[in-house]
């Protein structure tokens, strides 16, 4: 799931992340500017002159919170900004890190920076274990399944809870600070689950684009790709139709060696295609369309790749052929131009690499392991209600592939067991925000569950658009969503202070 990133497990894997204790800190400046975007940086193109200033800190975290034989520790990285913090109990906005380098998420979560002054809030961005620099076993963390055994969402949530309690205990003025968890995508799932599991630690949570129901027997497995298809259908004439036709065109042209050579040249691939590469090539294109749906932002941005504003509209300009008369070669020529919008908007890419679809700041191996253990998220296509080739969800095939990759078998029902599945009405103070353009909204909470477990839907929003910086091109729906979110924050802070809740 790319998430905010999620990395979706598709065909290549199954054919289808003041004073701060005496914790080790040093000062870092991150400049959000044009210089850090189009040349490999991780910040937004839309906040060109904003300087964000944070401390990078490390906390000795237990490797295993739930057993007693493994008593080792590792250094968990977290980032802190207290520039606007009211040291007399001002709130703490705590970002629950995703499956990747925490500095990347820090730079791409402008909402927290935008609201810090209004709330008098300290900002904390906590890195998820096994990602970025927070490696429980150092360079051996990914060496084998034994070392990967402590990569679970439950362990990560415990890390966050322990870190919050330690911050509140050690930082002068933070003892009475209400803590609000914030996260996007998998990080959003964690923020919701942190409130559910540790309500004594956080007073509320904003779970943006958090597909907490994208698990077996909770939502239809095909809804995800239906939303992707709808995004392309609404963005240009014949756009989804021609993508649907492209799979057969690939089969037709790749039937000969000359056709394979033509495809390799037309797409400017770094490595020439062979017959055995076709499934992977199709999967690469499929994930390209999915990623475009996730980051279909109304302005230039550099989240998974540097992209123009409303990138799907730009893509669809290359795919407006009359499907009844376009040739396979013409069609795939348009597909190659469309793919370049995603992979080479800057014009600096000499060739396209089919083994990579997004930024290197995400931890693919770690997420694949999580997907092969407890993050089992069924996805399927039928080729009728979506623009992809039919592909059923086959749990046994998925399990076999996981066993081949890692020597483990997934627990399909574990997330429902440990986090409550569809039954979350007993919880409180959680906002689930979802964008209507975001395919992950298929597994998100898009209706109010109670007065305090609420849904905010942003019809023209892509993947956690509300967590990004304010921008002049933002649709009014996301501006309204952010206002609502801050009002809920203020309500929770007021409630916490009245009840004198320490966390």
Image (tube, rainbow, N blue to C red):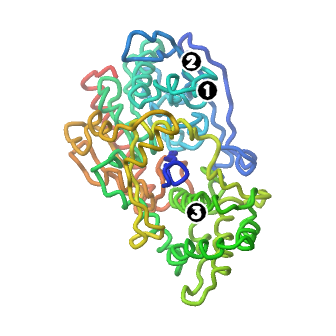
Residue 471 occupies quadrant: bottom right
Q: Are marks 1 and 2 in contact (CB under 8 Å)?
A: yes
- CA–CA distance between discs 1 and 2? 8 Å
Q: Residue at x 48, y 15 (%)?
A: 171
Q: Residue at x 28, y 47 (%)?
A: 454
Using residue 223 as the reference point, say whether residue 294 is left or right of it.
right
The percent coordinates of residue 34 (x first, y second) are 72, 49
The percent coordinates of residue 491 (x first, y second) are 31, 38
**Tag in front: 2 or 3:** 3
- Upstream in sequence: badge 1 or badge 2: 2
Count of numbered circles in the view: 3
- Upstream in sequence: badge 2 or badge 3: 2
One can see residue 316 in this view:
yes
Looking at the rendered structure, the secondary structure element under dot 1 is: loop
In the image, residue 378 above or below residue 237: above
The percent coordinates of residue 360 (x first, y second) are 65, 42
Specify the label residue 75 is tagged with.
2
**The one of 379 and 30 positioned closer to us in this rendering:** 379
One can see residue 124 in this view:
no
Specify the label residue 280 is tagged with.
none
**The one of 198 and 273 positioned closer to us in this rendering:** 273
- Upstream in sequence: badge 3 or badge 1: 1
Q: Residues within 10 Å of mark 3 (few under 14, many from 20)?
A: many
The percent coordinates of residue 279 (x first, y second) are 57, 60
Where is mark 3, residue-wise?
A: 282
Residue 345 occupies quadrant: bottom right
- CA–CA distance between discs 3 and 1? 33 Å
Where is mark 1, residue-wise?
A: 133
Looking at the rendered structure, the secondary structure element under dot 3 is: helix
């Amino acid at each position: 799931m790319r998430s905010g990133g999620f990395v979706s497990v598709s065909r290549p894997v199954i054919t289808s992340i003041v004073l701060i204790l005496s914790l080790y800190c040093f000062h870092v400046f991150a400049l959000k500017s044009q210089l850090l975007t189009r040349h490999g940086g991780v910040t937004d193109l839309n906040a060109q002159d904003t300087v964000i200033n944070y401390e990078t800190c490390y906390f000795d975290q237990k490797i295993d919170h739930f057993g007693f034989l493994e008593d080792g520790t590792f250094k968990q990285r977290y980032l802190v900004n207290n520039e606007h913090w009211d040291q007399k109990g001002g709130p703490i906005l705590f970002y629950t890190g995703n499956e990747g380098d925490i500095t990347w998420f820090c730079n791409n979560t402008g909402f927290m920076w935008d609201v810090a002054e209004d709330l008098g809030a300290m900002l904390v961005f906590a890195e998820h274990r096994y990602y970025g620099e927070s490696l429980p076993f150092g360079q051996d963390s990914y060496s084998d399944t034994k070392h990967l055994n402590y990569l679970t969402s439950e362990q990560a949530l415990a890390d966050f809870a322990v870190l919050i309690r330690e911050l509140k205990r050690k930082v002068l003025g933070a003892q009475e600070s209400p803590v609000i968890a914030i996260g996007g995508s998998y990080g959003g799932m964690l923020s919701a689950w942190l409130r559910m599991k540790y309500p004594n630690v956080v007073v509320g949570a904003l779970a943006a684009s958090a597909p907490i129901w994208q698990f077996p027997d909770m939502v239809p497995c095909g809804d995800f790709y239906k939303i992707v298809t709808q995004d392309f259908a609404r963005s240009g004439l014949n756009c989804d139709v021609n993508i649907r036709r492209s799979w057969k065109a690939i089969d037709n042209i790749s039937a000969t060696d000359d056709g394979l050579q033509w495809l390799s040249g037309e797409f400017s691939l770094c490595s020439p295609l062979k017959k055995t590469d076709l499934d992977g090539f199709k999967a690469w294109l499929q994930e390209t369309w999915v990623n475009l749906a996730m980051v279909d932002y109304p302005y230039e941005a550099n989240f998974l790749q540097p992209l123009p504003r409303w990138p799907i509209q730009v893509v669809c300009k290359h795919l407006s052929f009359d499907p009844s008369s376009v040739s396979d070669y013409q069609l795939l020529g348009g597909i190659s131009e469309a793919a370049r919008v995603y992979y080479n908007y800057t014009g600096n890419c000499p060739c396209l690499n089919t083994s990579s679809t997004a930024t290197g700041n995400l931890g693919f191996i770690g997420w694949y392991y999580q997907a092969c253990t407890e993050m089992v998220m069924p996805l399927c296509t039928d080729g009728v209600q979506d623009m992809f080739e039919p592909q059923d969800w086959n749990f046994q095939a998925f399990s076999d592939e996981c066993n081949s990759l890692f020597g483990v078998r997934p627990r399909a029902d574990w997330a429902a067991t440990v986090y409550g599945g569809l039954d979350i009405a007993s919880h409180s103070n959680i906002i689930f925000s979802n964008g209507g353009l975001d395919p992950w909204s298929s597994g998100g909470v898009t209706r109010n569950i109670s007065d305090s477990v609420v849904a905010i839907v942003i019809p023209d929003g892509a993947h956690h658009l509300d967590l990004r910086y304010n921008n002049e091109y933002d649709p009014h729906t996301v501006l309204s969503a952010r206002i609502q979110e801050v009002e809920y924050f203020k309500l929770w802070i007021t409630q916490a202070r009245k009840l004198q809740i320490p966390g």
